Image: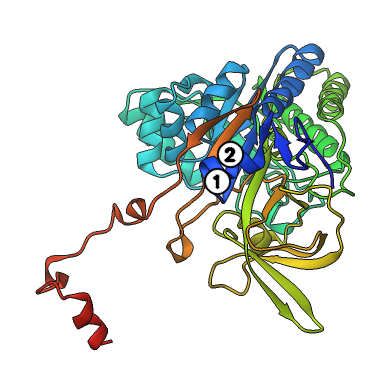
């Protein structure tokens, strides 16, 4: 077991986060419940912001909203002085509704729709990260239609394969994201952008993947991008003024995970950029980083209630909880691994090995395989750690399960930031066409007789 942020074990042997007893949180808000440690989120924002500002004043940290985004999170991010990386019209709308300034948003996506681009142009989005030649053309046409000039980055594939799950590698040549260096597409896109009237090329962007512990790929990416910037200067005369190196720094999901500190990560990126710029005699660009998981990942905990317990003699014991792949898709998607504690009796000795199963009608709905925990009973509370990133974001209504609530906890107070969905929420957008309307309302007895 490991504890993060403001977690502690109180006198009742209960897990406490942000000064809030998780047993009491379950009583007040129900389960499954996403609990976000606000103090830890702010601490991580400050670590990135302050370290980068000290070492490289011409810089900006942009929070990667796809990791976890709500209106409350947008307010927190603005308070902490970060920009915001958005990846859809829905994320833009959420941020705008929260009062987040569009000029501090960076709009990503490999297939932005015309409607999303029009929304971004209308609100004055700060930067578009252009992913392809077809987007370059579409954005130019829509910007002309709106009589605006879109400020853009070009997303570049640096040809670096980071050591992480292949689903979350993005910097290699065979990727749906970005324009390749090796095949000349990136340089061709630069030349095309510079000739396009309604586009203003401001910088380059790259992102090599996610949940990466090794420093070397980040260093290689920084060097590769500075080399490319020097090539652009030599072949076009254009000096790239802004460089966005994305995010991807890994967090701790298991006790044995040992990521470097956020400060060490920032120091490495800065030194890599400065080193290569000095080698080329290239002016230092404005530097942007886009952390997401490393800001919110370890700050999140998901609380479940234990339900059915089933023994398969000689094979395993299944313990089912009241959530699963509908609130945590990562295990099914990436074979992700997690630690968990029994929140209502944390210090009890782990005496049995069990598998934590979800409640969806799907054999692949497993949260944790083979974890050692104290003997569990129906009604116990299980807290799964490090669930702040890509859990709420990927939550879904499979089997028509309502999505969980989200609370921010801080200084002994819990604030509801996303209400739990109800059954009424599940059907509010459903329609029954006229030809399917029931001819008459049947009584329960009539229905049962015909069943």
Q: Is residue 229 visible?
A: yes
Say what secondary structure mark 1 lies in: loop
The residue indicated by pointer 1 is 393
**Under tag 2, what secondary structure?**
loop
The quarter of the displayed image where residue 130 is located:
top right
Say above or below: 223 vs 14. above
What residue is shown at x 76% (from left), y 57% (from top)?
337
Q: How many marks?
A: 2
Q: Please state the horizontal and vertical placement of residue 248, each as a whole percent of the image.
A: 73, 40
Tag shown at residue 302: none
Tell me which residue sits at (16%, 65%) in the image.
Answer: 433
Image location of residue 164, percent across then percent down? 78, 53
| 432 horizontally vs 141: left or right | left
Q: Left of 326 or right of it: where is 187?
A: right
- Residue at the extreme bottom of the image, as rendered: 450
Residue 213 in picture, x, y percent from top left: 84, 43
Neighbour class for label 1 at 10 Å: few (<14), some, many (≥20)? some
Q: Residue at x 87, y 63 (%)?
A: 351
Q: Is residue 33 or residue 400 the one in the foreground? A: 33
| Circles 2 and 1 in contact, beta carbons < 8 Å | yes
Residue 68 is tagged as: 2
Chain-order first, disc 2 or disc 1 = 2
The quarter of the rendered structure image containing the C terminus is bottom left
**Mark 2: few/some/many CA within 10 Å (<14, 14-19, 20+):** many
């Amino acid at each position: 077991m490991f504890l993060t942020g403001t977690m502690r074990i109180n006198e009742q042997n209960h897990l406490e986060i942000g000064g809030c007893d998780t047993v009491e949180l379950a009583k007040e808000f129900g389960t499954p419940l996403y609990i976000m440690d606000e103090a830890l989120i702010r601490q991580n924002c400050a670590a990135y912001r302050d370290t980068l500002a000290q070492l490289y004043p011409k810089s900006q940290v942009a929070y990667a909203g796809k990791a976890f985004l709500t209106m409350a999170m947008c307010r927190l991010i603005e308070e902490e002085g970060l920009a915001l990386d958005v990846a859809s019209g829905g994320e833009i709308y959420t941020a705008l509704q929260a009062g987040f300034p569009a000029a501090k948003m960076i709009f990503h996506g490999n297939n932005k729709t015309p409607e999303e681009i029009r929304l971004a142009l209308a609100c004055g989005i700060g930067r578009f990260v252009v992913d392809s030649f077809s987007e370059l053309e579409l954005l130019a046409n829509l910007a002309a239609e709106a009589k605006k000039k879109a400020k853009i980055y070009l997303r570049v594939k640096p040809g670096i394969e980071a050591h992480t799950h292949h689903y979350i590698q993005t910097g290699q040549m065979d990727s749906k994201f970005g324009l390749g260096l090796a095949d000349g597409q990136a340089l061709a896109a630069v030349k095309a952008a510079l000739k396009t009237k309604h586009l203003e090329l401001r910088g380059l962007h790259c992102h090599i993947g996610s949940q990466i512990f090794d420093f070397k790929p980040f260093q290689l990416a920084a060097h590769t991008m500075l080399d490319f910037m020097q090539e652009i200067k030599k072949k076009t005369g254009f000096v790239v003024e802004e460089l966005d190196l994305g995010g991807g720094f890994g967090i701790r999901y298991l006790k044995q995970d040992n990521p470097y500190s956020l400060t060490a990560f920032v120091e490495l990126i800065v030194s890599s950029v400065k080193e290569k710029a000095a080698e080329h005699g290239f002016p230092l660009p404005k530097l942007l980083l886009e952390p997401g998981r490393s800001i919110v990942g370890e700050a999140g905990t998901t609380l479940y209630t234990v339900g059915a317990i089933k023994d398969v003699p000689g094979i395993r014991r299944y313990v089912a909880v009241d959530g699963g792949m509908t609130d945590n898709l990562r295990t099914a998607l990436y074979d992700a691994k997690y630690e968990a504690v029994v929140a209502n009796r944390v210090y009890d000795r782990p005496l049995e090995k069990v598998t934590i199963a979800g409640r969806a009608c799907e054999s692949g709905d497993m949260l944790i395989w083979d974890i050692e925990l104290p003997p569990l009973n129906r009604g116990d509370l299980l807290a799964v750690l490090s669930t702040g990133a890509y859990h709420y974001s990927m939550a879904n209504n499979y089997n028509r399960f309502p999505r969980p609530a989200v609370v921010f906890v801080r200084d002994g107070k819990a604030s509801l930031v996303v209400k739990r969905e109800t059954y009424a929420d599940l059907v509010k957008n459903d329609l029954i066409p006229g030809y399917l309307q029931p001819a008459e309302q049947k009584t329960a007895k009539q229905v049962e007789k015909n069943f």
